Amino acid sequence: MGYKHLKFPENSTFLVTGGAGFIGTNLCETILNMGYKVRCLDDLSTGSRKNVDELIAHPNYEFVEGDIKDYDTCVKACEGIDYVLHQAAWGSVPRSIEMPLFYCKNNIDGTLNMLEAARQSGVKKFVYASSSSVYGDEPNLPKTEGREGNLLSPYALTKQCDEEWAKLYTMHYGLDTYGMRYFNVFGRRQNPEGAYAAVIPKFIKQLLNNEQPTINGDGKQSRDFTYIENVIEANLKACLAPSEAAGEAFNIAYGGREYLIDIYNTLTTALGKDIKPNFGPDRKGDIKHSNADISKAKRLLGYDPEYNFERGLNEAIEWYKTNL
């Protein structure tokens, strides 16, 4: 289980795009701890300089400040790289509805730049972040790859386009690509600030500050919340996956289902707070229920997530108590 036993060839070098962000920093830190080299590419538009500062002194870590929308930057970043973990993207469904042109340039054109740069550099594996949002309005649970509905946001569209481009790069150019359809990732270093912050860190911060959090909708929406350790495992196992599994996208989740109001109540209990939430309107473009079938990732990548929701939440709470 997990990824601690995984081995890569000596002197393997990884490029993590978006490596100053939440998922990216955790990937960089893990790879360094395993004894391999990491180049981090980030324009710091949503990533954090603080995350870079925590790793910059490590002899195997290199930080490149640059933008995936610039093809030459992508080419330079891929020089001498064995494995690309492409996490750079702008997230948030509501924000994508406000900024469709930017999302297209950043999430689609940026990913295409990275795919082409990786191909030109002879990268072994290209693992990239997709999203459960590609399931759109498909009503059946659990969500299963190959059974998608109508997309509900520009963000979802960008991720579907990334999957299609990646598939073509495997088909026509022999670049091994693996799409990670993340389901509501949470954990250490996730930013609790701003209007588009993810719900778990936002709730924790507000409760620690004795503020009243707002739940969008009635709180009865459900999500397959996925702890960061499971996501790290999936990315690293994809780098070691057989070429027969390339060109595919995989649900990366735990396979559970948590209701927002239950999570809120769990947090208030864990933090010893007696604060009732405020209920706001539903968020535009949001999917009501989400739960993943992870059998494909298990079968083809050897994915075997160690952290259930409860274990991950307890670790996240402890981290935020110390670091907020």
Image (cartoon, grey):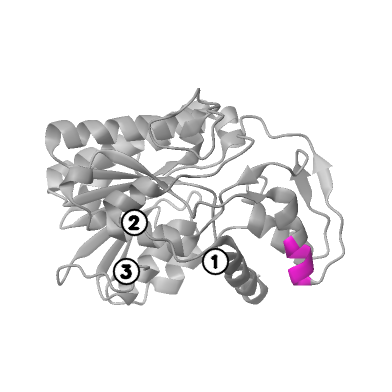
Q: Residues within 10 Å of mark 3 (few under 14, many from 20)?
A: many
Q: For the point 51% across and 42% down, which residue is it?
A: 91
Residue 18 horizontal side relative to residue 140, left or right: left
User: Observer-nearest residue: 119 or 8?
Assistant: 8
Q: CA distance from mark 3 to mark 2?
A: 11 Å
Per the image, the residue denoted by label 2 is 235
Residue 264 horizontal side relative to residue 178, left or right: right
Q: CA distance from mark 3 to mark 1?
A: 16 Å
Per the image, the residue denoted by label 3 is 31
Three-letter code for the amino acid on which mark 2 is drawn: Asn
Q: For the point 76% across and 46% down, which residue is it?
A: 215
Q: Quadrant of the C terminus?
A: bottom right
Where disc 2 sits, the SS reads helix
Circles 3 and 2: CB distance less than 8 Å?
Answer: no
Where disc 1 sits, the SS reads loop
37 drawn magenta: no
List x then y, in percent, for residue 98.
60, 29
User: Observer-nearest residue: 93 or 133?
Assistant: 133
267 drawn magenta: yes
**Is 272 above or below relative to 211?**
below
Three-letter code for the amino acid on which mark 3 is drawn: Ile
Q: Quadrant of residue 14?
A: bottom left
Per the image, the residue denoted by label 1 is 188
Query: Mark 1 or mark 2, which is nearer to you?
Result: 2
Q: For the point 77% across and 59% down, which residue is it?
A: 265
Magenta-highlighted residues? 266-271
Circles 1 and 2: CB distance less than 8 Å?
Answer: no
Closer to the chain start, of discs 1 and 2, is 1
